[in-house]
Image (spheres, rainbow, N blue to C red):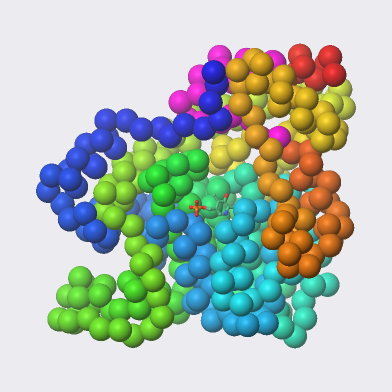
Amino acid sequence: MIKFTKSAITELEEEYVLDVLRNGSLSGDGKYTPLVYKQFEELFGIKNMLLTTSCTTALEMASILIDLKNDDEVIVPSFTFSSTANAFLLRGAKPIFCDIRKDTMNIDETLIESLITDKTKAIYTVDYAGVSCEYDAINRIAEKHGLFVIEDAAQAVGAYYNDIPCGTLTTLGCYSFHETKNYVMGEGGAIVFNSDKFIERAEIIREKGTNRRQVIQGLVDKYTWHDIGSSFLPSDLLSALLYAQMLRFDEIMSKRVNVWNTYHNILKPFEDSGKLRCPIVPNNCKHNGHMYNIILPNSDVRAKLIDEMKKKEVICYICYVPLHSSPMGRKLGYSPDACPVTEDYGERVLRLPLYADMTTENAEYVADSICEILRNL
Ligand SMILES: *Cc1c(COP(=O)(O)O)cnc(C)c1O
């Protein structure tokens, strides 16, 4: 059986987690959390970030930090995970769904301006499949209209736009280290700051609304309640796991990209058959091997391919049910035809198994099986 995803865990991860169990403090912001920050600074030049319990909570923190309120509007792609929208719905803000580009399936920057009203406060973007959105255009629009841009870079750790790391391209960036992402801590995430503006308040929000972090930093000797907040910081056990993963950054990246390339070398030539479309990565974007997805002619072909692949012991998954046409989207009153490209692609995208320790032979078997099945459909 070829699994869909699998974390790349070695003795290094075991060693650091055991070190915390034996010697360290189990709660947040212990020995390993600053080591993770140092790794991100070395790899991406990130000066300020905070580890969180997930990308979901990082997005929630971002929504608190930009002071979203009742009736504010947020422009967001519908082709994403529920967390991107829940983050600001929890503040009372309203999603205005924007359709996606046909190539990258990222938010279509040419449609954003037509959705801006007096109530618009922010644009939430998603770097789908570890391929960046078109941030030159998006940031220009945001600046012109005085909007915040929040980057859901859950899938984009190690991806680049014009040689700038994803997660650092906007007001605030959010990463995921969930088990299914490239670098894992089981459940975890981070919020990345691209100016000093939000850091002090973010540290308080992340610590249940208290200035506890200033005690840890030795700046004050007791802490009290200063703001709203929650418990958004992860146990140092999980930071230890992530530290090992980030030390293995290049190794994990190159293994994933190798699987991605193996798929592409077999499936791209098969594109001429008209039976599938391969991922498109614009020249100014560097992907991180997070996901290999194919677009099939229609939902019937997709369903048949999933079934036939299962018979060959390969698990493939559909990606997103578009948010605007999901049960919650309907409840909020969105019409299914609000985003036609999203609606169409939502029925036709298929994700192939991809993880660092997948062998080249297995990747070849998956890609060859897809060609064989589609040839006979
Ligand atoms: C995985 C994912 C999330 C959620 O990440 P968690 O760390 O599990 O909260 C949010 N947005 C996108 C686009 C994702 O892929």
Q: Is residue 72 above or below residue 78?
A: below
The residue sitting at 30% across, 79% down in the picture is 210
How many marks the image carries: the answer is 0
Residue 338: image quadrant is: bottom right
Q: Quadrant of the N terminus?
A: top right
- Residue 352: quarter of image: top right
User: Vertical placement of 103 versus 78: above or below?
Assistant: above
Task: Using the image as rendered, state which of residue 47 and residue 179 is in the foreground.
Answer: 179
Is residue 368 part of the magenta span, yes or no? yes
In percent of width and height, residue 284 lies at 66, 49
259 in magenta: no
The C terminus, quarter of image: top right
Q: Position of residue 27 (x, y in %)?
A: 24, 58
**Is residue 5 visible in the rendered structure shown here?**
yes
Q: Which residues are magenta?
A: 350-369
Q: Is residue 334 above or below residue 307?
A: below
Question: On the picture, is 134 further left or further right than 242?
Answer: right
